[in-house]
Image: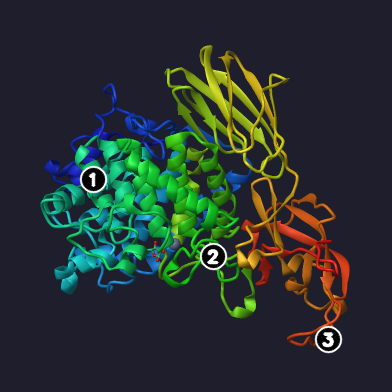
Amino acid sequence: MGSCQTRRSFLVSAAAAGLVASQKLSALPAPSGSAQGDAWRDQGVLNLDASPYAKLRSVPVRAVTLHPGFWSRRRATNVGSSIPSMRQELLDHGRMDNFLRLEAKSSAPQRGPVYSDSDVYKWMEAAAWALESDDSPELQAQLKQWTRAIADAQEPGGYLNTYYVGNRRAERMLPDTQRTGHELYCIGHLLQAGIAYYRATGDPALLEIGARFVDGYLLPGFGPEKRAIVAGHPEIEMALVELYRTTGKRQYLDLARYILAGDPRIPLTPPQIVYMFCGVPLTSRTKLEGHAVRAMYACCGATDYYLESGDATYWKTLNTLWTDLAEHQLYVTGGVGARREGEAFGNAYELPNATAYGESCAAIGNMMWNWRMLAASGEGRFADVMERALYNGINSGMSLNGREYCYRNPLAFDPATGDVIRNPWYDTDCCPPNLERTLASLPGYFYSTSKDGVYVHLYDNADLDWKLASGNGIRLAQRTNYPWDGNVSLEIAPARAEEFSVFVRIPAWSRNTVVRVDGQAWGNTVAGEYLAIRRRWSGKTSVEIEFDMRTQPVRANAAVAEDVNRVAFQRGPLVYCMEELDQAAGEHGAVPDLPRYAADLRGEAEAQFHPELLDGVTVLTHPCVVSRSPGKEALYRTGAEESSPASLRLIPYYAWANREPASMQVWIPVAQNPAGSVV
Ligand code: FUB
Ligand code: ZN
């Protein structure tokens, strides 16, 4: 990226903006030109370089270049369409006026729910990560402008929240406000945005605003011997740990630990303990429950704390919760949170389809949590969940044109319900900028390093230009047509010859994978694990991977009531769905009625790429039977079922709801013969 502001030039501009020198972060890396001057450049989405219990280290977003392919297209849409249009939506809905009003620069009344500041911060985080990949003077200027407005709205003591002002001032950080008021949730997002902006540009201005809240307001007044804290909506925990990683100041980590432990001085009722996923020791949790985003963010914070502390009780709890996720709570799309009521996890195996909540933020929280578990362990099972969420339940959240978003991501849909699934704006606008920050930071998720070598987590045309633990430079070029095709070529080129491992992820769905190093078959691949290719690498070496892209019908556990006698289709990392629009018209040209289609599993799916459809997707065609409608159908009937053979056409789930409203379903009934057995 091009113009990055040095800390020295920032200090000049900050002084001009009237920031008080004594309130600056004391422990940020030294100015440019000194030994560690550009440390911010080397920090990834998480800065795990000094995390004692991280097996993997993140690579900076800027170290990975996406070339034309699946994610570069989505990323370009994000930068070119989503981020600018969301900025306008935030302005149009008064979210910046909320800040300007406090400085008498706007006369508009406060607008939006208590957590509205966080949507501005999430947008800023998205814009900041985007700057790591493309220099955009316009985006830089916009970020600077909003940073100044936010700085101006901050009170001298550090407090900042545009909702708890005026008549609501007296409510600040009262126990009840902490339970529901989202003050620390907003500050968590401010800190994350500030860290992203700092890592992208070297400019700590936004980060200093967040740190000033923590240093000037939170730490002096709140904590074990002071006024109690309850998170209310977890988020601050992971932000505090990242602030610790960025500044080295231990108080931030200690504060995160204190919040994760829960303070009984702010009691929560049993339903609040479930819903808020905080307020009692995180380590006392035995299952995922309550508000899904809260639970996922709490797990992120707890894993971050584990990565720094190595506290075995945390690791045990996190693994218990992860097992609950993987065995009972995870949609096949990687979404989580079954219930609309309370935006919550359901009971084990409660995974309805049409009423699935599957909030985009919850799927993002799921990916963020698994990214942290992966960093702690290097285990493929976490990367599998990440990939499932990313390609499906997260990717579905943003329309192909980048201007409309899903809040819910159901697995079946009927437009007759009146539900409009994609919208450019929500009054609770948490999901859109969350999707934007995820896509903008995505290059940072492709690779990691460890003391043993380099890890390849995701597949696309993504080049890494970074360094090994030894400091030796490494270039890794990746070429593929993934996820449409399972062939991947890697070219590994260390600056100097060195022995290390390239850890190639073999996804759990790839039942037979072939890996060749310079044309020679290498080792036994195990689905769901990383294959360690350990050797002395010198010059340029090619690694060719062939994943098993056969379409697989997936069955759910028999306890998932809505999926009994149904299958979902998965090809590579993509889960498929049928949209009414793609099915052949029914009898007499009638609109295809999705519930009448049943997959005939004696046949196999054919896969064909359609460049003109939905920005280019591989469509699956699968034999099926369609039950005939005997005119107006009675509610109940007896006698044999009549059906005729046909074909299902399936599109990737992420691409649904990008044409006119149509019914959709992921789980498709399996055709039965008259005796009831599967045909
Ligand atoms: O409460 C803030 C955000 O709004 C949550 O994370 C979302 O689930 C939505 O309720
Ligand atoms: Zn959301």
First in residue order: circle 2 vs circle 3:
2
Q: Helix, strand, or loop for circle 2? A: loop
Distance from mark 2 CB to nearest ligand 1 atom below 8 Å: no
The residue lying at 38 percent from left, 53 percent from top is 297
Q: Position of residue 492 (x, y in %)?
A: 59, 22
For label 3, the residue is: 631
First in residue order: circle 2 vs circle 1:
1
Q: Helix, strand, or loop for circle 3? A: loop
Name the one closer to the observer, 514 or 459: 514
Q: In the rendering, which numbered label is found on residue 208? A: 1
Q: Position of residue 494 (x, y in %)?
A: 53, 18
Q: Position of residue 44 (x, y in %)?
A: 41, 36
> Which residue type does callout 2 highlight?
Glu
Query: Does the residue at mark 2 contact the one at mark 3 (Cβ under 8 Å)?
Result: no
Q: In the rendering, which numbered label is found on residue 350? A: 2
Which of label 1 and label 3 is nearer to you? 3
Q: Is residue 660 above or below residue 435?
A: below
First in residue order: circle 1 vs circle 3:
1
Can residue 140 be seen in the rendering of this structure? no
Distance from mark 1 CB to nearest ligand 1 atom below 8 Å: no
Q: Is residue 431 above or below residue 550?
A: below
